[in-house]
Each structure stands twice: as C-alpha cells, then as structure tokens.
Image (cartoon, rainbow, N blue to C red):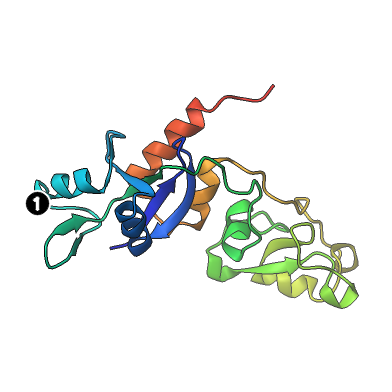
Amino acid sequence: MGDTLVLNRNYFAVHISNWQKAVSLLYQGHAEAIDENLQAYNFEDWVELTKMMEHNAKGFVHTTTMRVAVPEVIRLTRYDRLPRQEVKFTRKNIYSHYKNRCCYCAEQFSTKELNLDHVVPKSKGGTTTWDNIVLSCIDCNTKKDDKTPAQAGMKLLVQPSRPKWKGAATVTMNAPLPIPVSWQRLIDSKYWESELKP
C-alpha cells in the first residue's frame, strides 16, 4: 500500500506516514484526505467517495462494513507548524547532498561505489558530523587511507557542509523513490508559492 504524504493545516509537507497511521488520523478526525485537485474530505465524505472508486493507487482497507481508499495525501486539521528546519544527518542525505560525487576526484558513482570519508580521520580526532564527512570513491578512499587530505597529497574539491533546508522538498529526502506525481505537484506548488524572505 505504501506511504502517505502528510501536510500541515497550511498545505506544507511535514511528514511521510505509513498508510495505517494515515487512515487512523483520517478516521479520528485529525486529518482530511486530499485528492488530486486539492479538495479536502473528512472521513465520512472520503468513505462516500471511495464507493465510486474502482481503482486506487494506494489500495483499499476493508472492514466488515465498508471499504476505504488509502489516501495518497492527507492534511492535518490542527497542526500548522513546520518540521525542524535542519536536514537530518543520514547516509541517504549525505549522498544526496554531494550528488553521488567523489569529493576528491569529482566523478559521479553509484552508491555502492562510494564511501563516507572522514576528512580528518577518527584516529586523529575527526568527528562524524556534517563538517567532517564527505563522499569518496573507493580509489580515492584507498589512496587517502588514514590520513588528512594534505598528508595524502590530495585536494578536497568541496568544503564539507550541512545542506541548507529547502522547505517542503526536504521532507521528501526521506521518501522511498521515486516521489509519486501526486506528492511532487504539492511540493512544487508550495515551493513556487512560498513567500521569499528579504
């Protein structure tokens, strides 16, 4: 059945939920189902709409008395905050931040051909943080070994850094790929409609 995109009350993506939690929030009245036209439905209306559906991308939940379509997108009815404005320090986000490129030779590789590299090795007091982790291909990683780039005679082509928060689009960094079209439309529209700060 897959995951459901969760929007806050103001239609900004804030979370990705499993289908069980999404249907539960809808049933309890804590969320509304959102269709492809951004029309919102409470649980009762969604059940009525489900009766007219032959197919649903996320499938259906069957009870003894009804069939309920699993919504692709829900909107929380009371929550209007945004997730913390900081990208999580995860392997997936590191690979995304550096676009699967080795930070020493600038070549792009598949994820299995790249390693996380401590610029200052752990044995020399280096930390496992955004400021000290980059991607390196196997050849560059082998050449660098347990040395700093200077000690290995290598040039680090990018400065290690924390990625910048990109609003709703950042939420999808945790999504299973590819992003469903119904999600991307919402994320794109909010990106272009969001007020810029001076």
x, y percent for residue 3:
36, 59
Give the residue drawn at x 89%, y 62%.
150
x, y percent for residue 38:
31, 34
Q: Quadrant of residue 57?
A: bottom left
Would you say 164 lies left or right of 1 here?
A: right
Q: Quadrant of residue 60?
A: bottom left
Q: Which quadrant does the N terminus fall into?
A: bottom left
Q: How many marks?
A: 1
Give the residue drawn at x 32%, y 43%.
182
Nearer to me, 143 or 52: 52
x, y percent for residue 103:
71, 57
Nearer to me, 111 or 132: 132
Give the residue drawn at x 34%, y 49%.
29
Q: Which quadrant does the C terminus fall into?
A: top right
Would you say 52 lies left or right of 26 here?
A: left
Q: Is residue 100 visible?
A: no
Mark 1: give few (<14), some (14-19) or many (20+) Cα within 10 Å.
few
**Residue holding disc 1:** 54
**The furthest residue to the front:** 28
Q: Secondary structure at mark 1?
A: loop
x, y percent for residue 48:
14, 46
- Vertical placement of 96 versus 80: above or below? below
Q: Amino acid at mark 1?
A: Glu
Give the residue drawn at x 47%, y 33%.
190
Nearer to me, 61 or 89: 61
Q: Is residue 58 visible?
A: yes
Would you say 114 lies left or right of 39 here?
A: right
Would you say 164 lies left or right of 64 here?
A: right
